Amino acid sequence: MSEALLDTPTALDAPLVIADRPLRSRLMLGTGKYRTNPEMVAAIQASGTEVVTVAVRRVDLDRTKEEGVLHHLDPNDYLLLPNTAGCYTAEDAIRYARLARAAGFTNWVKLEVIGDQETLLPDAEATLRAARELVADGFVVLAYTNDDLITALRLEDAGCAAVMPLASPIGSGLGLVNPYNIRTIKARLSVPVIVDAGVGTASDAAVTMEQGVDGILMNTAVAEARDPVRMGRAMALATEAGRLAYLAGRMPRRERAVPSSPLAGMLD
């Protein structure tokens, strides 16, 4: 393998494709909780992401207002992915998705229907109902869900373009709690699996990508870092490192030591 290839690790991996759209970066970022809009923009740029999510409930859809998040993000530079964060019913999520489309966003939507105010865990039944209606209405739906295989399979059957199981609860920073469930979902689904929520730092991102998933979406880990710009860059490197480690294949775990150097030829 040439040194030129080793210097550009992304050349070693195929693009992530969602709904026929190729993406070079497997990292997606949210726009909430940043201390300032310029800091948000700098962190997003440092991350190299191509997909940026914005909560329809929380943003001013008028891009002309300088204080608004959307004023600072050029849709020519990023796929601005509206999400239905904060919705507790299927009806609310559907309404906000349609509002975003009417405001000029693409027909892509990150579907999120929360079922519990304390844990912020998803409402699987409502998410499925909203997914079916939005797909029928022509939306490209990326659905946030629990790390539950059955729900993930049903979301795929509903026509979702990607399924987004959580690593751990939203904003917790606990990292990947159940790698077995994530690997099982990835093994059984045909559509891309993007892990969403719970990643706290770069090592969490690497471990998550090592499960073989197609990408990661995060917000708080970058926005609440002491230095969001550096963390954005760290997450980009960790996502790429985890992906490459998965593709390379991990060495077996052993319960005994095995010498790295051959023992043949040792002095008597």
Image (tube, rainbow, N blue to C red):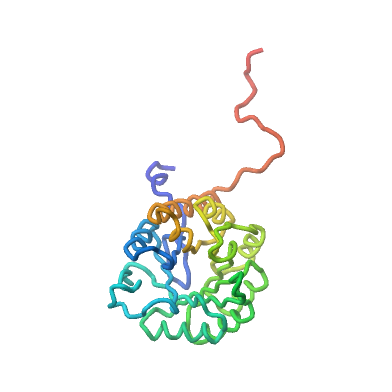
Is residue 99 positioned above or below 171 on the image?
Answer: below
**Toward the viewer: 160 or 28?**
28
**Toward the viewer: 237 or 157?**
237
Question: Tag count in the figure?
Answer: 0
| Furthest residue in direction right, as rendered | 255
Q: In which quarter of the image is the C terminus?
A: top right
Residue for point 40% across, 42% down: 2
Residue 29 percent coordinates (x, y): 44, 64
Is residue 172 positioned above or below 210 on the image?
Answer: below
Residue 11 seen anywhere in this rendered image of the structure: no
Q: In which quarter of the image is the N terminus?
A: top left
Residue 43 seen anywhere in this rendered image of the structure: yes
Residue for point 41% across, 67% down: 31
Residue 222 percent coordinates (x, y): 44, 58
- Quadrant in which residue 40 is drawn: bottom left
**Toward the viewer: 80 or 135?**
80
Is residue 250 positioned above or below 60 on the image?
Answer: above
Residue 15 percent coordinates (x, y): 45, 61
Residue for point 63% across, 65% down: 185
Residue for point 34% across, 66% down: 37
Residue 44 percent coordinates (x, y): 38, 61
